[in-house]
Amino acid sequence: MILAGDECRRTQRGNNNAYCQDNQISWFDWRLVKKNKNLVRFAQALIAFRRQQPTVRQKSFLKGLPQAKDQWPDVQWFSRLGTTPDWHNGEASLIALFAAPDAQHDPESVGQHVLMIFNATDQDHEFTIPPITRKARWRLLINTALDTPNDVFSNGDGPAPPRSGTFVVTRHSLRCYVAHE
């Protein structure tokens, strides 16, 4: 296990340039790994997801356009109501749809569609999954509002969103769904 420190709350007291200090600021306190094991587990799950999911690590700039006819755009943004977002209202909630890379354009990058739901507000809000995404079979991967270890479903066995497509997302939280064939 390689640790940098952020994943176990090693702050270096805010010093991001401590390489030249040979003192407690730059020393790695291995007790932090055990003390913050849930944060380490969460970070490891996110790293594993990124490694196995080409959709969240695409090599080309996302343009908001389909890669081929009859496909979703590579990235698409929605308001919490599942509609076109109003970028000028200052609302801190958003839905992002990342379409899996097209196998014909990049055979090494076959992935799954990813739907991320962000509620950065101070209040719980009702969200509606965009109508275009309702035909996909979504499974919850991450819900930061849940207590550990129920915040990550690494095996793709998380619950599906409600059939109504509408649900409450807790304040200051993120949900990430992955489409399954």
Image (cartoon, grey):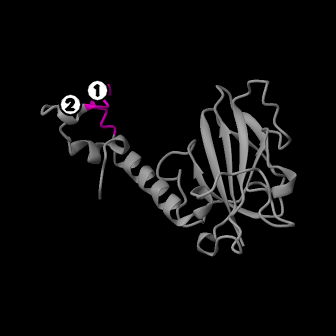
Q: Is residue 140 above or below residue 122?
A: below
Task: Point out residue 9 in the picture as x, y percentages from the top left corner.
Answer: 34, 38
Q: Is residue 28 left or right of residue 106?
A: left
Task: Point out residue 171 in the picture as x, y percentages from the top left corner.
Answer: 64, 32
Residue 155 belongs to magenta span: no
Q: Is residue 21 above or below residue 45?
A: above
Image quarter of residue 168: top right
Task: Name the residue: 29% across, 55% down.
Answer: 2
Q: Nearer the viewer, residue 57 or 172?
A: 57
Secondary structure state at the residue bearing disc 1:
helix
Image quarter of residue 70: bottom right
Q: Is residue 73 above or below residue 31?
A: below
Mark sitting earlier along the chain (1/2)? 1
The residue segment tinted magenta is 9-17
Quadrant location of the N terminus in the rendered image: bottom left
Disc 1 to disc 2: CB gap under 8 Å: yes
Q: Is residue 89 above or below residue 127?
A: above
Q: Mark 1, residues whose alpha carbon is within 10 Å: few (<14), some, or many (≥20)? A: few
Q: Is residue 16 left or right of residue 142?
A: left
Task: Point out residue 43 in the picture as x, y percentages from the top left corner.
Answer: 43, 50
Residue flagged by tag 2: what amino acid is it? Answer: Ile
Q: Main secondary structure of the magenta part?
A: loop
Residue flagged by tag 1: what amino acid is it? Answer: Arg
Q: Badge 2 is on which residue?
A: 25
Q: Badge 1 is on which residue?
A: 13
Task: Name the residue: 13% across, 31% down.
Answer: 23
Task: Point out residue 169 in the picture as x, y percentages from the top left corner.
Answer: 69, 40
Q: Is residue 17 left or right of residue 27?
A: right
Task: Name the residue: 21% across, 46% down.
Answer: 30
Task: Name the residue: 37% across, 44% down.
Answer: 7
Secondary structure state at the residue bearing disc 2:
loop
Q: CA distance from mark 1 to mark 2?
A: 7 Å
